[in-house]
Amino acid sequence: MSTNTRRLDAELFGRETDFEYSEHWIGYAILALRVTMGWVLLQGGLTKLITYLDADPANDWTAAGYLANAIPEGNPFVGMWGAMAGSPLIDMLVMWGLTLTGIGLIVGAFVRWNAFWGAVMMLMFWAASLQGGLMAGLPIAHGWVVDDHVVYAALLFGLGAIGAGRILGLDAYLEKLDVVKNNAWLRALLG
């Protein structure tokens, strides 16, 4: 085995699995996935934030229009979404959550924390796109069960599990700080 190749041995769903991978290329792949996912979230947040901070209040972005009018018919959570419509807190959580999570992923800071909350947001967005309940097969606009939000949530889960912030990210530096070394809860947020 060359020095650039590693072997991963793991147990998944009770079955042993192992494979070889290139350290060199896996690092590039993880970095590309982290930065790309960060950009997607940052872009989504900034487009909302810029219109919200515009000088003309008539142009302010709000989730109210979507939550009150664009939720698909038959969505099992329609009442919950309707109750959230018009809430300034929901607007702030969406705008700043997307923006700050995107920045954190791009620079590789607090990646586990950001990946967790990014996945939660994606699953909420997925739930808002449901067109029916379990008995209807959990349909969404472009198929059943899985859409881009589920893919993003799975990707974010993987980035957090890998500790992707250690690869050319600020987490590699932050983990060396004494305050982090001495606090297990801080170490859990990094990666």
Image (tube, rainbow, N blue to C red):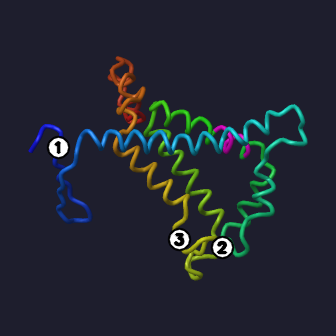
In magenta segment, residue 39: no
Residue 19's spot in the image, x, y percent? 18, 55
Q: Residue furthest top?
A: 178
Of labels 1 and 3, the one closer to you:
1
* Residue extending furthest toward the bottom: 135
Q: Is residue 14 above or below residue 1?
A: below
Position of 129 with respect to 59 (left or right) is left
On-image quarter of the N terminus: top left
| Amino acid marked by disc 3 | Val
Name the residue rendered at 68%, 41% in the picture: 95
Q: CA distance from mark 1 to mark 3?
A: 36 Å
- Mark 3 or mark 1, which is nearer the start of the sequence? 1
Does the magenta run of residues contain 92? yes
Q: Tell me the SS state at disc 1.
A: strand
Asked whether, in this view, residue 170 is left or right of residue 9, the answer is right
Judged left or right of residue 138, residue 189 is left
Please tell me in which quadrant of the rendered image residue 163 appears: top left
Residue drawn at 86 percent across, 42 percent down: 59
Q: Which residue is mark 3?
A: 145
Please give the residue where the numbered disc 1 appears in the rendered image.
5
Residue 103 or 126: which is nearer the viewer? 103
Q: Dot 3 lies on which element?
A: loop
Give the amino acid type for the residue marked by disc 1 in the picture: Thr
Mark whose residue sits in front, 2 or 1: 1
Front-most of residues 142 and 78: 142
Q: Please report the bounds of the magenta region as a residue range.
A: 91-96
